[in-house]
Image (spheres, rainbow, N blue to C red):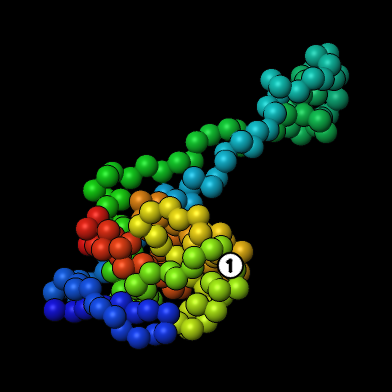
Amino acid sequence: MATIDIINGSMKKVGSAELGDTLLTEKLNKAVLYQAVRANLSTHHHGTVNTKTRADVWRTGKKLYKQKGTGGARHGSRKTAPFVGGGRVFGPHPRDYTIRLPRKVRVLAMREALRCALIEKNVTVVQEFPFKTPKTKEASQFFSAIKVPGGLVILDKASDVVEKSIRNLKGFKILRVDQLSPYEILKYQKLIFTADAFAEAQKRYL
């Protein structure tokens, strides 16, 4: 059975976590990862853009010129698209771009995203963060010691001390296990779990 090491701030192994027999050997379901990322990105599209049609612009309602005898096209209003200030044809209007996935697809996408990180050996599990008070310098030294220049830090529960120590470090982001999404997992090159957070992630998704 495959395992992943749990280390301390000195890069020394202090334990291990067991992984499933086929967790690292099964073929990745890239299609479900694509769907999950696309669904996440769709929530960033506000869909508030709006253009005016000929019904929304104010122009005179008088006919431009007589219907026949001019040798030109037959226009009846300056509100139409060919004229400056006229309404736009088939322009964008407010709409909801959100893509909603079934619950089973979302759960499977989380499993596949975590498997992808594990297969590529982008997961680091630390026993705990040794910060007693919020100190950005201590956090920087800790990550330098375990040779992680940046990544997604995942906690099992909220911690003001850890969050305040890390939040100003460039290239890092902090989330709890229940806030994880496939998009966030795939976005960051490294995932740094606490031992408790990794156990919770295994229970939930693996």
Residue situated in front as seen by the camera: 72 or 57: 57
Residue lying at the far top in this picture: please name it.
62
The local crowd at label 1, few if under 14, some if 14 to 19, many if 20 or more residues have their Cα within 10 Å, is: some
In this rendering, the answer to whether 144 lies above or below 86 is: below
Going by the numbered disc 1, the residue's amino acid type is: Lys
- Residue 68 percent across, percent down from the top left: 80, 19
Give the residue displayed 28% in from the left and 44% down from the top: 102
Residue matched to label 1: 135
Quarter occupied by the N terminus: bottom left
Q: Quadrant of residue 192?
A: bottom left
Residue situated in front as seen by the camera: 161 or 120: 161
Q: How many tags in the picture?
A: 1
Numbered disc 1: secondary structure: loop
Residue lying at the far front in this picture: please name it.
132
Quarter occupied by the C terminus: bottom left
- Residue 52 percent across, percent down from the top left: 70, 28
In this rendering, the answer to whether 145 lies above or below 72 is: below
Q: Quadrant of residue 58?
A: top right
Give the residue displayed 56% in from the left and 59% down from the top: 164
Give the residue displayed 33% in from the left and 62% down from the top: 197
Give the residue displayed 44% in from the left and 71% down from the top: 130
- Residue 51 percent across, percent down from the top left: 68, 33
In this rendering, the answer to whether 12 lies above or below 18 is: below
Q: Is residue 205 visible?
A: no
Q: Is residue 50 visible?
A: yes
Q: Quadrant of residue 140?
A: bottom right
In this rendering, the answer to whether 46 lies above or below 188 is: above
- Residue 163 percent across, percent down from the top left: 51, 59
